[in-house]
Image: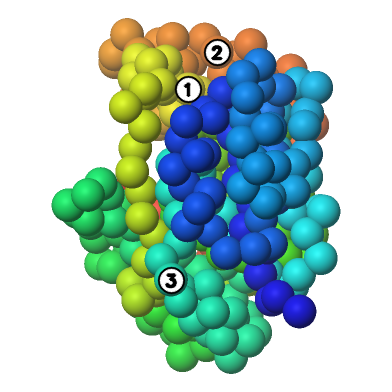
Amino acid sequence: MPDVTTVVATRNRADELRRSLVHHRPPVIVVDNASDDETADVAREAGASVLRLSSNLGAAARNLGAEHATTRYVAFADDDSWWAAGALDRAVGLLEGHPRAALLAAQVLVGEEARPDPVSDLMADSPLGRPDDLPGPAVLGFLACSAVVRRDAYLDVGGFSEALHFGGEEELLALDLAAAGWGMAYVPELVVHHHPSPHGRDPVARRRLEVRNRLLTAWLRRPGRTLAREVARAVRTSDGRHGLAAAVRALPPLLRARRPVPPEVEAARRALTRY
């Protein structure tokens, strides 16, 4: 029986899936965020299981994929990324040997040139050290397309937040895992290939979403002084002000969901401020 399921959340990216799915080993679950193209057909033709959603849940669609998985571990991939051969077997072995680890972040190599993603370089230089019970430098963030998780730990903390949709959604999950006592590590020998789609998303909209989600995450999990700093930072730019306005609109359902992380987790997060 397989030890790990790959979950791909996607929307209207049939061409990207045609390229990436041939690199995935089964089992693979594709969660279709209400596409109106041939995404679901392409996934089925590649042998993946398909969950078709009636609405776009954003990053939270990955939670449904994880719920449907029957393996102990779940690897996430984007529709334009895939795990290198042997990486998932290695990840399973590391997770089996390090029971406190809930998430391993792989090295991401971008494009045909296989350029290291700058985020991978930052994780390699993590100021959080390398605890003896983790297989690499401790991290408090990651790229979703390069993460393999302990399924039960991921689901127990709620997975990715539906409120954040997409854009920096990883931070909230990382804080929740850390608050629950789990460890996360960067393991560069695990490799993910990322070939960004030529049909990229709107970069302005993306920046505004990231501001919005950074503010919402600060409200949900971080001290008031941090939230105040994030607001002051946001108002300095046009994109920041748009993101702040979007965060204010999204806030009412989250007013009672505020749950600041324990002091030791906040201290670790502050150590990453320069990042």
- Judge whether residue 111 can be spotted in this image: yes
* In the image: residue 249, left or right of residue 186: right
The mark that comes first in sequence, 2 or 3, is: 3
- How many other residues sit within 10 Å of disc 2, few (<14), some (14-19) or many (≥20)? some
Quadrant (top left, top right, bottom left, bottom right) of the N terminus: bottom right
Mark 2 lies on a secondary structure that is: helix
Rendered residue at 25%/67% (across/down): 125
Name which residue type carries label 2: Ala
Name which residue type carries label 1: Leu
Q: Report the disc number at residue 85.
A: 3
Mark 1 lies on a secondary structure that is: helix
Rendered residue at 46%/76% (across/down): 86
Alpha carbon distance from label 1 to label 2: 8 Å
Q: Is residue 196 above or below residue 54?
A: below
* Extreme residue in the front direction: 45
Q: Which residue is mark 1?
A: 209
- How many other residues sit within 10 Å of disc 1, few (<14), some (14-19) or many (≥20)? many
Rendered residue at 63%/86% (across/down): 96
Labels 2, 3: front one: 3
Labels 3, 1: front one: 3
Alpha carbon distance from label 2 to label 3: 41 Å
The mark that comes first in sequence, 3 or 1, is: 3
Q: Report the disc number at residue 111.
A: none
Q: Which residue is mark 2?
A: 246
